[in-house]
């Protein structure tokens, strides 16, 4: 492609709210056949809400919520916000928190009113030696509904299964249809559990899923989609998406996402609207075709 045609192409893209940080990305995008999308904050709004709290025997709803929400006041994870908001809606007073610890991709723990409280994924409970098997059927039912199940433990005993649900962005179904219409394979990468990821993929018609991916595992997950020399684009918004954005053949960041993601990306979708991906691809095909 000539520098002029790339300038024209990237200029048109900018009018559509798609910012090319590197001119070469316009060319690279034409050759992409797989588009991998981060789930939380990219396909979904990234603003989950608490939908369920199922207490274990000997525990009560408000009691567990009070302990868990207290711990989550110290976390910046979107899940934490959902749980703290739920406690506010119930006018629950939160006790002071000590010894807070976060294990990225797993969960959080702290001391609250002299008790040890842990909340997180099933793998977090396994890591701290808590058996969740009694609650697996409940968690699976919640996962099948597209909700994300978590577990809460108090003083080493399983206290509840909690579910949060993160609404899908209004523009996501249309964006995925458009990507399919362009002949692309659509994949999703998420730290969320397998049942939840499968339910969301089913709902959206997503072709391939990598679930339960740890924050440092996104690059490896991305590489798996590169079979038979396929060129892969990755779309993400979070701090932990930065390595995958850099590794992808084309990295596209959601403009409303974190600065770290934007810095690592080749392309920025200014509006945070996934339909920008389709615009960018269509434009790259048109531009590169015109100069042949
Ligand atoms: P994602 O953003 O895709 O959910 P993360 O790596 O941030 O991926 O988190 C993976 C999982 O770890 C979450 O789905 C949740 O089960 C657990 N987790 C992480 N942080 C917290 C937290 N503050 N409170 C409860 N669970 C958490
Ligand atoms: Mg995200």
Image (cartoon, grey):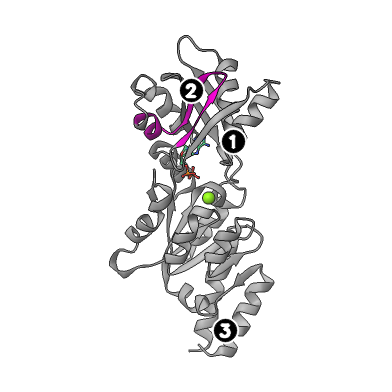
- SS class of the residue under badge 2? strand
Work out whether mark 1 precedes mark 3 in sequence or the reverse, and give the earlier one. Answer: 3
Q: Position of residue 110 (x, y in %)?
A: 51, 29
> Is residue 170 part of the magenta span, yes or no?
no
Within 10 Å of disc 3 (Cα), the crowding (few <14, some 14-19, many 20+) is: many
**Mark 1 close to ligand 1, CB under 8 Å:** no
Work out whether mark 1 precedes mark 2 in sequence or the reverse, and give the earlier one. Answer: 1
Q: Which residue is mark 2?
A: 116
Count of number-bearing discs: 3
Question: Image check: 220 left or right of 111?
Answer: left
Q: Is residue 54 above or below residue 218?
A: above
Q: Position of residue 109 (x, y in %)?
A: 49, 30
Give the quadrant of residue 94.
Answer: top right
Is residue 207 in view from this perspective?
no
Q: Which residue is mark 3?
A: 6
Who's the residue at 63% across and 30% down the image?
84
Q: Main secondary structure of the magenta part?
A: strand
Distance, label 1 to label 2, CA atoms, is 15 Å
User: Looking at the image, which is closer to me, 36 or 172?
Assistant: 36
Who's the residue at 58% across and 58% down the image?
274
Q: Position of residue 71 (x, y in %)?
A: 56, 29
Q: Which residue is mark 1?
A: 74
Mark 3 vs mark 2, foreground winner is 2
User: Looking at the image, which is closer to me, 229 or 257?
Assistant: 257
Is residue 217 in view from this perspective?
yes
Within 10 Å of disc 1 (Cα), the crowding (few <14, some 14-19, many 20+) is: some
């Amino acid at each position: 492609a000539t520098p002029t045609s790339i300038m024209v192409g990237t200029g048109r893209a900018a009018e559509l709210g798609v910012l090319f940080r590197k001119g070469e990305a316009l060319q690279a995008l034409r050759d992409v056949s797989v588009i991998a999308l981060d789930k939380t904050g990219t396909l979904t709004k990234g603003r989950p809400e608490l939908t369920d709290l199922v207490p274990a025997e000997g525990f009560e709803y408000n009691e567990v919520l009070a302990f868990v929400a207290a711990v989550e006041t110290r976390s910046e994870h979107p899940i934490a916000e959902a749980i703290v908001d739920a406690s506010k809606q119930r006018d629950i007073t939160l006790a002071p928190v000590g010894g807070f610890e976060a294990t990225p991709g797993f969960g959080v723990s702290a001391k609250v009113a002299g008790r040890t409280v842990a909340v997180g994924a099933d793998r977090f409970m396994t890591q701290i030696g808590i058996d969740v098997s009694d609650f697996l059927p409940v968690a699976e039912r919640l996962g099948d509904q597209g909700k994300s199940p978590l577990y809460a433990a108090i003083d080493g005993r399983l206290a509840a299964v909690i579910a949060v649900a993160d609404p899908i962005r209004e523009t996501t179904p249309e964006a995925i249809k458009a990507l399919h219409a362009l002949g692309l394979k659509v994949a999703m990468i998420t730290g969320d559990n397998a049942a939840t990821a499968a339910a969301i993929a089913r709902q959206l018609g997503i072709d391939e899923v990598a679930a339960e991916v740890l924050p440092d595992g996104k690059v490896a997950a991305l590489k798996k989609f590169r079979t038979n020399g396929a060129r892969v684009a990755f779309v993400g918004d979070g701090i932990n998406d930065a390595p995958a954005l850099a590794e992808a053949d084309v990295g596209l960041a959601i403009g409303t996402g974190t600065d770290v993601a934007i810095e690592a990306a080749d392309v920025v979708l200014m509006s945070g609207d996934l339909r920008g991906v389709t615009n960018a691809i269509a434009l790259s095909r048109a531009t590169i075709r015109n100069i042949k």
